[in-house]
Image: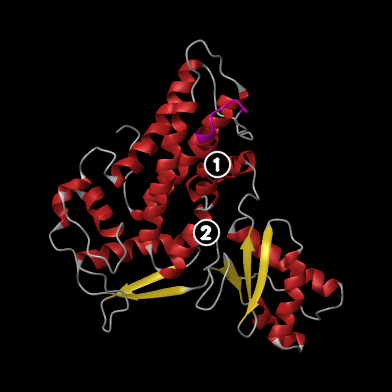
């Protein structure tokens, strides 16, 4: 369930409470859901109960408890917890979407998969020092926050509210893509490494794995076209005789793709482009493990399973390309 879908789910819970006479309010046009703040829990939280308390003539905690009962009965919701004065914290079921539904959603939305309006109307003010790493992080956050409907305003006034550990050397020597990765991949409080390791084309280089995985999914599409078949989303059900690690690799990839909207929302809310970078490494490693199962081997004819795996690989490539774009890094077709 994406943040946009969850927002609609919250509004439906309000509407049910109104229809059943538990609340007497006008159903709002929008319900803001975002990663939980301090003291919260679960995947997302909403302050809708605090918003409705005054017009409903009831304490926020009581409004939250009413909505909690309706949300807890919703498909895809694993748990609902009320914290503080009336914040509703929602945990989602990790396997709510099938492989076919998830793949179709990603291919339909393209590089905008995971984008939402959860921060619509929000302006994030970033005050940064005149330093290259701070500038690069602010630039990435402008894109990431924008993907959630918000807007970033950057200036250099003191006191700074974003002051990452500076780069020890000039990152420009690495070239634009590797330089940005070197500055964005570590957490802001960690010192970045400005070394040639970011340029080597080996598995030890996370940036190489991400860009290679993206290029590899595009190569799979070209190879499949040469073999005369195209992607078709389907439930990726590995046969019983398949090795257990193959089935597990597919499940890991599906989980990583399904988690992408939440990763974007958290990166925007907590100002952590590094969490997006690390997530892309997770997706890349997962898709590279699945790549050998996508194309037919030997005299094997393309089957529905091959078409479904190709669609899944293309979806993973789309997520990688979209994530790299938000970080300001190129996603090449060939590598």
Left or right: where 328 falls relative to 231 = left
- Specify few, some or many for label 1: CA neighbours under 10 Å numbering under 14, 14-19, or 20 or more: some
Name the mark nearer the viewer: 2 or 1: 1
Tell me where residue 40 appears, x and y as whole percent: 55, 75
Tell me where residue 102 appears, x and y as whole percent: 60, 44
Left or right: where 236 falls relative to 324 = right
Residue in front for this viewpoint, 144 or 240? 240
Which residue lies at the image location 42% right of the left edge and 48% below the top edge? 282
Q: Which residues are magenta?
A: 239-245
Which residue lies at the image location 27% right of the left edge and 43% below the top edge? 204
Left or right: where 69 falls relative to 219 = right
Q: Quadrant of residue 193?
A: bottom left
Tell me where residue 30 appears, x and y as whole percent: 65, 69
Tell me where residue 196 appears, x and y as whole percent: 16, 47
Q: Which mark is residue 251?
A: 1
Mark before the other along the chain sequence, 2 or 1: 1
Q: Secondary structure at mark 2?
A: helix
Q: Magenta stretch: dominant SS?
A: loop
Which residue lies at the image location 65% right of the left edge and 73% below the top edge? 81
| In magenta segment, residue 249 | no
Q: How is the image coloured?
A: secondary structure
Residue 331 in view of the camera? no
Q: Is residue 5 above or below residue 269?
A: above
| Total count of labels | 2
| In magenta segment, residue 242 | yes
Extreme right residue here?
Answer: 20
Q: Secondary structure at mark 1?
A: helix
Q: Quadrant of residue 82?
A: bottom right
Q: Is residue 329 above or below residue 16?
A: above
Q: Which mark is residue 262?
A: 2
């Amino acid at each position: 369930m994406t943040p946009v879908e969850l927002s609609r789910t919250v509004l439906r819970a309000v509407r049910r409470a109104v229809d059943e006479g538990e609340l007497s309010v006008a159903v709002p046009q929008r319900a803001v859901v975002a990663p939980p703040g301090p003291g919260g829990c679960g995947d997302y939280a909403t302050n809708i109960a605090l918003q409705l308390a005054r017009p409903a003539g009831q304490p926020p905690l009581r409004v939250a408890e009413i909505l909690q009962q309706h949300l807890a009965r919703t498909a895809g919701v694993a748990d609902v917890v009320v914290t503080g004065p009336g914040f509703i914290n929602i945990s989602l079921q990790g396997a709510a979407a099938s492989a076919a539904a998830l793949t179709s959603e990603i291919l339909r939305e393209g590089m905008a998969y995971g984008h939402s309006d959860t921060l619509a109307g929000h302006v994030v003010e970033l005050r940064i020092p005149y330093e290259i790493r701070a500038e690069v992080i602010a630039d990435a956050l402008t894109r990431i926050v924008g993907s959630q409907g918000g807007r970033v305003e950057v200036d250099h006034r003191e006191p700074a509210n974003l002051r990452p550990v500076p780069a020890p050397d000039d990152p420009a020597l690495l070239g634009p893509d590797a330089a940005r990765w070197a500055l964005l991949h570590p957490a802001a409080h960690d010192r970045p490494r400005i070394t040639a390791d970011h340029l080597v084309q080996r598995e030890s280089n996370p940036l190489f794995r991400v860009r290679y995985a993206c290029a590899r999914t595009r190569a799979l599409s070209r190879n499949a076209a040469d073999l005369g078949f195209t992607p078709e989303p389907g439930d990726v059900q590995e046969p019983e005789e398949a090795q257990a690690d193959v089935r597990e690799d597919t499940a890991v990839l599906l989980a990583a793709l399904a988690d992408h909207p939440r990763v974007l929302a958290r990166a925007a809310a907590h100002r952590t482009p590094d969490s997006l970078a690390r997530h892309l490494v997770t997706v890349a490693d997962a898709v590279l493990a699945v790549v050998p199962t996508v194309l037919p081997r030997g005299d094997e004819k393309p089957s529905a399973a091959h078409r479904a795996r190709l669609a899944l690989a293309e979806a993973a490539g789309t997520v990688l390309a979209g994530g790299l774009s938000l970080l300001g890094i190129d996603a090449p077709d060939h590598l």
